[in-house]
Image (cartoon, rainbow, N blue to C red):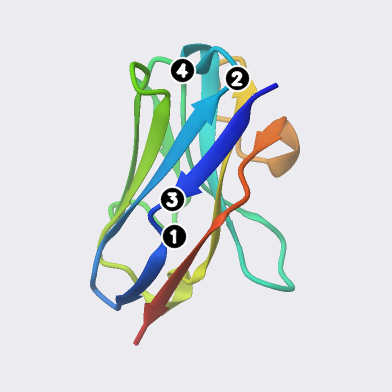
Amino acid sequence: QVQLVESGGGLVQAGGSLRLSCAASGGTFSSYTMGWFRQVSGKEREFVAVITWSGRSTYYADSVKGRFTISRDNAKNTVYLQMNNLKPEDTAVYYCAARGGSSWYRNPSDFAYWGQGTQVTVSS
């Protein structure tokens, strides 16, 4: 069983930056594809970014491309989401997720393991 714990959320002004972290335990982190999703209350969970097990391949939602960067450190069992030039519409609870296999998975249903989420609020 894989446990995921996100951290790094908070309140930031528009144009600012945050870095989210997701620490994994209980599984073979280096074999998992890792994803970041976000969700606004009352809306469906939305894909943000994904990174394959090696870290060599990434994919982003159009809404964050060029502003967000996903990366991972397999030695630390941690995946990161660097968020720059934040906008009020980026406000959401951000979740990390994990699954086996290596592909650009983008649907929440593709992922077996989820963290509890971390709130990101961007003020205008």
Q: Which mark is residue 53?
A: 4
122 w.r.t. 107: above or below = below
Q: What's the amino acid at mark 3?
A: Ser
Q: Are marks 1 and 2 in contact (CB under 8 Å)?
A: no
Q: Locate residue 83, reporting x and y percent.
A: 32, 56
Q: Amino acid at mark 1?
A: Ser
Which circle, 1 or 4, is nearer the viewer?
4
Label 3: which residue? 7
Q: What is the quadrant of the C terminus in the image?
A: bottom left
Amino acid beneath label 4: Trp
Q: Residue at x 61, y 15 (%)?
A: 101
Mark positioned earlier in the residue sequence (4 or 3): 3
Residue 86 image offset from top left, x and y in percent: 32, 68
Query: Which residue occupies 60% across, 19% down?
Result: 26
Q: What is the spatial separation of the Cα atoms under label 1 and label 2, in whole angstroms? A: 32 Å
Mark closer to the chain start, 1 or 3: 3
Quadrant position of residue 8: bottom left
Q: Residues within 10 Å of mark 1 (few under 14, many from 20)?
A: few
Kindly check if marks 1 and 3 are in contact, taking CB atoms under 8 A apart as contact. no
The label nearer to you, 2 versus 4, is: 2
Of the numbered discs 2 and 3, the one sitting upstream in the chain is 3
| 14 vs 73: above or below | below
Residue wearing tag 1: 63
How far is mark 2 from mark 3, CA to CA?
18 Å
Which numbered circle lies on residue 95? none
Q: Which residue is under mark 2?
A: 26
Question: Distance between the Cα atoms at labels 1 and 3?
Answer: 22 Å
Mark 2 or mark 4, earlier in chain = 2
